[in-house]
Amino acid sequence: MTAPDAPDGVDVEKPSAARIYDWYLGGSQNWAVDREFGKRVEKVWPLIRPISRQNRAFMNRVVRAALDAGIRQFVDLGSGVPTAGNVHELVRDRLPASVVYVDYEPVAAAHSRVILDREDAGEWAGIVERDIRDPEAIFADEITERLIDWAQPVCLLMITVLHFLGPGDRPDELVATYRDRLAPGSWLAVTHGTVRDDAPPERAAEVRAFVDAYRDTSNPAYLRSAEEIRPWFGGWPLLEPGMSTLPDWRPEAPVSEEDGEVRPFAWGAVGVKPS
Ligand SMILES: C[S@@+](CC[C@H](N)C(=O)[O-])C[C@H]1O[C@@H](n2cnc3c(N)ncnc32)[C@H](O)[C@@H]1O
């Protein structure tokens, strides 16, 4: 696959975490250097691509369900490179609606700007290049102010991003700050890496090796149990089927054996803010 022109100033000789993730998803915004790095990671954790795709499919089902429920505003925290069926691609056919992407990685943000510009989506979608640990700056950003009316329901997506926050980042308090900002009827969607007790031991060891490899980098990752994730919903009712493995959240087709293998390694759930 040939990637389109890179944004000005973006180095395509050096692998980028956001573009590697794009490759896991089968996206178009990755270069040879990213794919080579991704293939090395795949050797350590062969489930990385299937789980990334299941994660994206979960997010797609949530966004479509939110649109069907009448929600017209989407805030995607830790959005990465928005290709391979990202939020604005799903929303485009259901306008009027608005999308705010948030990512602090300059390469992800630069690609996001180019994509939204090229697709002429600037009027209803934007990228806020900020750290999700600074919610007040995200709320006050001119792009958020232009596109989001917090008095109306919002679908807030925290998809495969909270595992980058350690205990020192106080994720419970941070997620509560976002929850408080949302109007009744809003949705909060979370996916998060885990290792459930029913994981085959050799597969569980691969995940732990993968996480350990990142332990001393600038992007350490944390696995969490359902008991640690549930409080982030602040007691809000969860949409059926509740806290779920990724493939089993409202599947649209029978789950294949390969897709089923990711079950022990991630949780997904969607909460709805009560009136
Ligand atoms: C694994 S990717 C997930 C992308 C997308 N949410 C998905 O599920 O397909 C995680 C993204 O979160 C971003 N990220 C991690 N920590 C962040 C933070 N503190 N603030 C903003 N973005 C962050 C990374 O730059 C990366 O693009």
Image: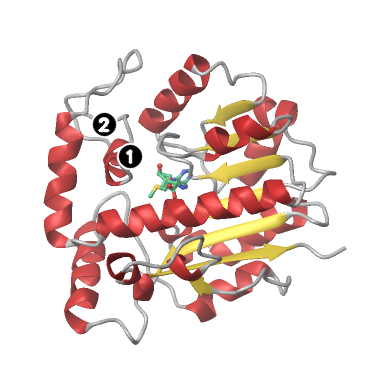
Q: Residue at x 61, y 74 (%)?
A: 242
Front in this rendered view, residue 273 or 10:
273
Q: Residue at x 36, y 76 (%)?
A: 264
Q: Quadrant of residue 34?
A: top left
Q: Secondary structure at mark 1?
A: helix
Quarter the N terminus occupies: top left
Under mark 2, the amino acid is Asn
Residue positioned most to the front: 254
Front in this rendered view, residue 162 or 193:
193
Residue 13 position in % (x across, y down): 16, 25
Quarter the C terminus occupies: bottom right
Characterize the local packing of mark 2: few (<14), some (14-19) or many (20 or more) Cα atoms within 10 angstroms: many
Q: Quadrant of residue 107?
A: top left
Residue 221 position in % (x across, y down): 34, 60
Q: Residue at x 67, y 65 (%)?
A: 271
Residue positioned most to the bottom: 197
* Residue 7 located left or right of residue 188: left
Write down the residue under mark 1: 22
Mark closest to the chain's N terminus, 2 or 1: 1
Front in this rendered view, residue 48 or 11:
48
- Disc 2, disc 1: CB below 8 Å? yes
Write down the residue under mark 2: 30
Q: Secondary structure at mark 2?
A: loop
In the rendered image, the vertical position of residue 67 relative to residue 255, given as above or below: above
Q: Disc count in the image?
A: 2
Residue 153 position in % (x across, y down): 78, 48
* Residue 110 located left or right of residue 101: left
Under mark 1, the amino acid is Asp
